Amino acid sequence: MKRSLSLTTTLALILTLLASCAKPAQPSASAEPPASAAPTTPASAVTLAYPAPFADYDDYVYSGVPSIPDYSVGAGLGNVENFSQFSAGNRDWSTSYGYWHSDNELSDEAIRLIEQNGFAVSDKYSYAEFFQLYEANRYEYVPSFITSDSAVHTFHLMFDYVLKDLEQSRLYDTLIQLSRGMLDASYAQYEELKGASFENAALRNTAFFSVGLKLLDSDFSIPGEVADVVSQELALIDAQAGVIASPVLNLGGDIDGDDAYRADYTQYITRSHYNQTEQLQAYFKAMMWYGQMTLRSRSADEVKSALLQTSALTDPELSALWFNIFEPTNFFVGECDDITHYQYADALKDLYGAGLGSAAGVADETRFTQALAIIEKMEPPQINSAAAAPGYRFMGQRFTLDAYVFQNLIAVAVPGRMLPDSLDIPAAFGSEAALKLLEDDVRAFPEYSAQMAKLRAEIAETPQETWTSNLYRSWMYMLLPYTDATDGAGYPMFMQSPAWTQKELNTFQGSWTELKHDTLLYAKQPAAEGGNGDDPPEPPDDRGYVEPAPTVFGRLAALVKQTKTGLRDRGLLTDEADEALGVLYELSARLTEIAEKELENIPLSDADYELIRTYGIELEHIWDTSKHDELWQTDYGSFSAASYLNQHPCGVVADVATDLRGFVLEEAIGFAKTIFVVFPRDGKLVLASGTVFSQYEFTVPISERVTDEQWHERMNLNDLPAIAEWKQGFICDVGETRYGY
């Protein structure tokens, strides 16, 4: 019988019942965490504490009334005041001053779309980073259109930078200490339990932590008793060949049998930002090992290994090390979706008592029989990964709402649909436009409609507190407004067109793709720049416009503040990142205020226009901070478009779902594209330009999961997937791509 839980119930279970997801009571905000990241866990790992919020979230709700007067765009943009700035035949001012910003030249197709919708996105003019067009506009006195795309993209830069810095400066060393401690404890248990029924389980743990430690430290000497099986396991990890039986997990059992534990070794293809240093590569593989390999509840001997790991983690020092990795990653990504030692300890504390803290106590055969019965009743994961069988994971991977949506729209839930579509997410969040674009799936898979209806009803009930309980969810909460069509009176013309609704879906996909990229290691995957110079005497009026999306900008400000506060209070933020996040917070808050003024037809101040004019400088400052570390000091030789992209890419790629029959679903961000928008200013219509996401979805064989480096090479060669057909309703000049740097 298919198991069915409402999302509200699911989230409640994850937040309150899954002990592996619980976090210890936090130190007070005034406490100064020591540089060594001292223990943040209770003295005893078997004492549970309800997870306190890592940082508060100050929600934003727009309560104004949109009051922009109606307007329309004339044929040939004849009523657009500054059309000459975008026309190849009218370059008088620009050429007299010495240059012409040809990337703002409109094609006939772009003009047609602007006449119809008030805006157009051009595939012809693309940029390696979002800020570049805004800086070009500032130099050449072209009005800028500040997109929400560029703002949320900038948060991705900081999120990825801060996470990467944390992994290198704190988590890597902590993971080595934890691995060594667990190996020592496991070997001691093995020595103690020789000749007992738990001997093989202890030996398995010795091999398990030897693999993790060898991945982290190539100089580590593997204990002789497990040298052969560990070498076999490492060879499979290096080969990344596919779904294969694990020598270590199947130690002492039939590795060729039907019930052998099989792991997806393609997951060890180092992806996201983890190829940038050897240290990050090692951390990625070790965390993938600790996060994916499952000691199944249905296997008595594997449960014995899980119990012995739980026993070892009753040691306060080892427990502290575990929590010093687990709690920060909880804040970034979300609650664990797997059974860990914390849940084992909670479920078995009455049965074992103090005996849980010793190998001999755990190995008591009478209690073990009872323990098996308790473990079999533990809540299984909400998201299936490569190992669908319920079981214990040393670190585990995280529950995310989007993966939950995917899981309920593929495989068993929707027979025959083995991979999801990125449009499933906004559709489940309430987007009618996204659901309409999925009509083929609705027709092809009979169970799809009912499952989607169920998901939409459940998600609609999710309270704000749940949406903003960690950075991953707060990011998704920021994207929610993109699922609402802004087609009512009082909005600017371009926002009332169906094409804008599609552009909003593209922005949703773009930012979501960056989120998946940044958190690829932790989130569980469902299986199935300023310049100077003399100004011209009378430059054009370059007063620009902010996308009137106050809710997005407001929630971005809240998300940035939540990130900054949560990490700074725990000493997990560098001064540079703290400053850059402060700049992004102030910028987001100001953009929120400007968007509110625009919607309510309140004239902007000179300071507002100056912010729009210098927006590119602000973005470049934040971007520059995110790239100022040793990871980007690579010598790519002489300057070229390719080297510029490789050092400063906005392009990222992430695999988001797996069909274990041989394919994975990839989501990617290409060059930033140019958007042209007509907006009202002082009773006249003005044309502005800005940058938006280019987003692609495609499938590849499971053994060819795509890395950022491979994606950058494809971008350099203009070897990109086709633009989705539905996006060609607002994207013009398809296939005529050229690049601005």
Image: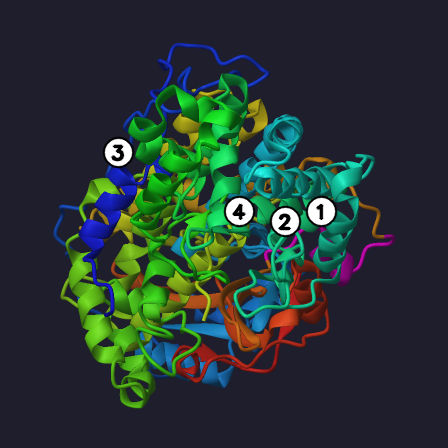
Report x, y in % for residue 301: 51, 48
The mark nearer the N terminus, 3 or 1, is: 3
Report x, y in % for residue 666: 54, 69
- Mark 1 nearby-residue class (10 Å; few <14, some 14–19, many ≥20): some
Q: Which residues are magenta?
A: 637-650
Residue behind mark 1: 276
Does dot 4 land on a helix, a strand or a loop? helix
Between 633 and 737, the one nearer to me in the picture: 633
Give, as a three-letter code, the residue at label 4: Gly
Q: CA distance from mark 3 to mark 1?
A: 34 Å
- Mark 4 nearby-residue class (10 Å; few <14, some 14–19, many ≥20): many
Residue behind mark 3: 58
Q: Which quadrant is home to the N terminus?
A: bottom left
Residue projecting furthest to the top = 31
Q: CA distance from mark 4 to mark 3?
A: 32 Å
Residue 60 lies in quadrant: top left
Residue behind mark 2: 273
Q: Residue at x 41, y 47 (%)?
A: 338
Does dot 3 land on a helix, a strand or a loop? loop
What is the number of the mark on residue 33? Answer: none
The mark nearer the N terminus, 4 or 2, is: 2
Q: CA distance from mark 2 to mark 1?
A: 6 Å
Residue behind mark 4: 291
